[in-house]
Image (cartoon, rainbow, N blue to C red):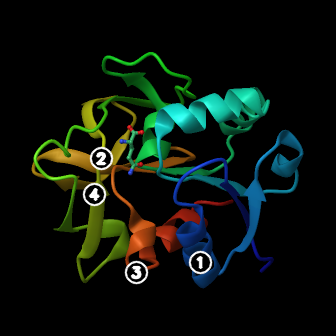
Amino acid sequence: MNKKRVGVLALQGAVEKHMEMLKRAGADISLIRKSEHLEGIDACVIPGGESTTIGKLLVRNNLFKPLKQRIEEGLPVFGTCAGMILLAKDIQQYDQPRFQALDVEVQRNAYGRQVESFEADLSVAVCGEPVVRAVFIRAPLITRIGKTVTVLASFEGSPVLVRQNNILAGSFHPELTDDPRIHQYFISMIP
Ligand code: GLN
């Protein structure tokens, strides 16, 4: 089987750890900084970072429209934390550039009021046993979820890993542990 090429959006944020994980999960990697870099990729990761900054840079680098179009055409995309915010249809209180491809509403920084970051064990059926250790860093909370969105993992009653067709999104940072299973699952979504 041909190796899949995953482009990691590399405008700002947690890029390198995703690259390491994707390589471990068996993918070829390229970095996406401008629209030409979208050619030849089979999937895309939108990393964590600061969603307002990534959104502005997407627009400034003329990447927003072509990437939105690729996502709408079915490009498998995995957004983590800020990446999930950028994929969300609605964001509470903020009107910032976003792809509006995933039928959820999110509240930014909603887990991070008392503690900036924390870890939790999640049951993720698509990853099997054992549980997945998840690192949350000023993470977005999903406050509404559309009917066609599947919940793959929850924490304290709220979805934290969801899928809608070609789109996978997590509130946490699966690239920061030593466990490639979520990246492997994402690669398995590539047709
Ligand atoms: N708080 C950031 C935002 O709102 C997301 C944090 C992260 O990606 N770790 O964009």
Residue contact between numbered discs 3 and 2, judged by CB atoms under 8 Å: no
The structure residue drawn at horizontal position 66% and vertical position 34%, both measured from the top left corner, is 57
* Whole-percent x, y for residue 138 in the image: 29, 47
* Whole-percent x, y for residue 133 in the image: 26, 73
* Whole-percent x, y for residue 86 in the image: 51, 35
Distance of mark 1 from mark 4, alpha carbons?
Answer: 19 Å
Label 3 secondary element: loop
Task: Using the image as rendered, state which of residue 13 and residue 38 is in the foreground.
Answer: 13
Distance of mark 3 from mark 2, alpha carbons?
Answer: 19 Å
Residue contact between numbered discs 1 and 2, judged by CB atoms under 8 Å: no
The amino acid type, in three-letter code, at marker 3 is: Asp
User: Would you name the residue on which mark 2 appears?
Assistant: 139
Distance of mark 3 from mark 4, alpha carbons?
Answer: 15 Å
N-term-proximal mark, 1 vs 2: 1
N-term-proximal mark, 3 vs 2: 2
User: Would you name the residue on which mark 3 appears?
Assistant: 179
The amino acid type, in three-letter code, at marker 2 is: Ala
Name above or below for residue 154 compared with residue 82. Answer: below
Residue contact between numbered discs 2 and 4, judged by CB atoms under 8 Å: yes
The structure residue drawn at horizontal position 53% and vertical position 53%, both measured from the top left corner, is 13
